[in-house]
Amino acid sequence: MGFFFTGYNLTTILGFLLLVAVLVLLNELSRRSKILSIILYIFVPVVLFTLIGFDVVGSPSSKTWFGTVKAVSALLGVLGFMLIRYTRVEHTKFAIYFPVAILGINILEAVYRDIEVFMNYKELTVDEAGLTLLGGYWNLFNAAAGVLLILTMTGFVGIRVAKTPSKDMIWPDQVWFWIVAYDIWNAAYCYNCISTRAMYSGIALLVSCTVAEAFLKRGAWLQHRAQTLAIFALFSLIVDYASLPAFSITASYKPAAWGVLSVAAFLVNLGVFVFMILQMKKTKRNPLTNELYTDLACYKKNMDANNLN
């Protein structure tokens, strides 16, 4: 048994790698094609929801409001980003406020859930969805990390569309250290609140969008995040992946593991918050009305990668 997870074997490792590879591939193909984006994020969901409605297909997640709402909200995010990328909405305030609003709401929902688990699960419990939960100080640390994450969403006024054939939605000020802070926070959230499925709904998703950001298209992390989340959400509605041997890596359910991950999330996000404050003092910029990190090499690389200089 590992410290954070258990269930490792050749089959489960290959299953994890295959899932990440498929998410990265579908994200990349749809990112490059407007037509494929319309098919994958509009027509396919309509067909799947129709089949689910007639009980032709469906996993246990499709029978719960949470699974359905999660899939719909992820798709709405992708569709909003497609409007920004492919229509004149790009030149309106919608292009500035929709991305930060949907991301902030998503984080707030997770903060609320961490607090809810802390208050309601005082003993190791398997809930009605089959998730093993235990509330503790780790929930409060991670909830605080989520609040810091929202406070450090800087420079959203600089969101724009790349001057490249793929017309990606770019948030240049959303630089690598904020993304790392988000990844650790979200991994801790999934570990705290979706523990049984955290390796897949948490780690695999985070790896896929971060790989896409680091190696395929810089500056488009939020777009990568929304698209990979939407693809996985649709997959989870029609496939009971948790019952498959290839997807049987689960959390170790150790209080120490919960604590280490959530405290790490808090400390990393606190570090990003402190750096933001120092940068504000140094540059005299307001991150709500200006881009903050324009002097950093990582910001300049985001701009260069999208022909925005």
Image (cartoon, helix red, strand yellow):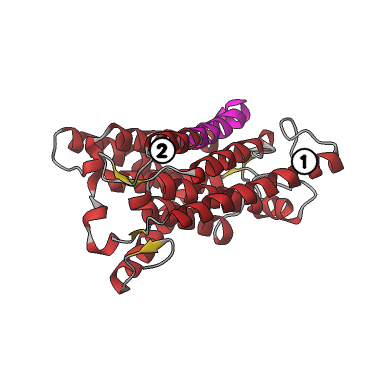
Magenta stretch encompasses residue 103:
yes
Q: Which amino acid does label 2 sit on?
A: Val
Residue plotted at (56% across, 40% down): 146
Q: Which amino acid does label 1 sit on?
A: Ile
Q: What element carries label 2?
A: helix
Residue plotted at (80% across, 44% down): 279
Q: Name the residue under label 1.
A: 277
Q: Which of 250 and 48 is in front in this view?
A: 250
Residue plotted at (68% across, 38% down): 154
Q: What stretch is highlighted in magenta?
A: 87-109
Question: Residues at badges 2 and 1 in contact (C-beta under 8 Å)?
Answer: no
Q: Name the residue under label 2.
A: 117
The image position of residue 262, as x and y in percent, is 53, 49
The image position of residue 291, as x and y in percent, is 74, 39
Residue plotted at (57% across, 50% down): 263
The image position of residue 201, as x and y in percent, is 38, 50
Magenta stretch encompasses residue 250:
no
Q: In this view, does 306 lie above or below 67?
A: below
Query: Which of the two labelled residues, at mark 2 and mark 1, occupies the earlier sequence position?
Result: 2
Which residue of the protein is positioned furthest toward the front in this rendering? 123
Q: Is mark 1 on a helix, strand or loop?
A: helix
